[in-house]
Image (spheres, rainbow, N blue to C red):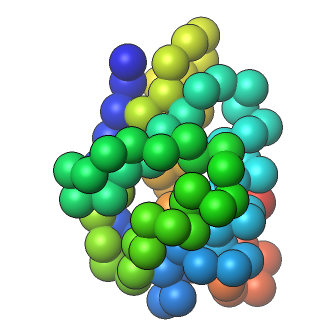
Amino acid sequence: MPSTDVAIGSPVGLHARPASLFVQAAAATGLPVTIAKDGGAPVDARSLLAVMALGARHGDTVTLAAEGEGAEAAVADLAKMLASDLDAEGAPSS
């Protein structure tokens, strides 16, 4: 199962718009994707409530993992997304 650690780039962390964009991108992979904060229990990255409940703030490190065909690419794309400022104009949506 491919996984990677990434620091949250959005100044507001994974809250509101950034969390929504991330969850939509995770769901669009069609794969089971998980996200965990600071070695905590992984949660379903396709669930907005679960992602927001992590309380991930700017600079916090999270671990992304996915399983299935194309999981490596999906994890890399999602990590790149999380590292960016998802509140900025023209921020990537996937």
- Point out the image quarter for the N terminus: top left
Q: Residue furthest top?
A: 69
Closer to the camera, 82 or 92?
82
Q: Can residue 61 be seen in the rendering of this structure?
A: yes
Q: Is residue 60 above or below residue 5?
A: below
> Residue at 57% across / 56% down in the picture?
50
Residue 88 at x, y = what percent? 68, 85
> Residue at 64% across / 62% down in the picture?
49
User: Does 24 sit left or right of 73 as displayed?
Assistant: right
Q: Is residue 22 above or below residue 44?
A: below
User: Does 29 sit left or right of 77 as displayed?
Assistant: right
> Residue at 73% across / 63% down in the picture?
21
Closer to the camera, 42 or 30?
42
Q: Can residue 81 be seen in the rendering of this structure?
A: no
Q: Quadrant of residue 6?
A: bottom left
Residue 2 at x, y = what percent? 38, 24
> Residue at 49% across / 89% down in the picture?
11
Q: Residue furthest left?
A: 39
User: Does 89 sit left or right of 62 as displayed?
Assistant: right
Closer to the camera, 55 or 68?
55
Closer to the camera, 76 or 2?
2
Q: Quadrant of residue 22?
A: bottom right
User: Does 22 sit left or right of 44 as displayed?
Assistant: right
Marker count (numbered):
0
Q: Is residue 90 above or below residue 5?
A: below
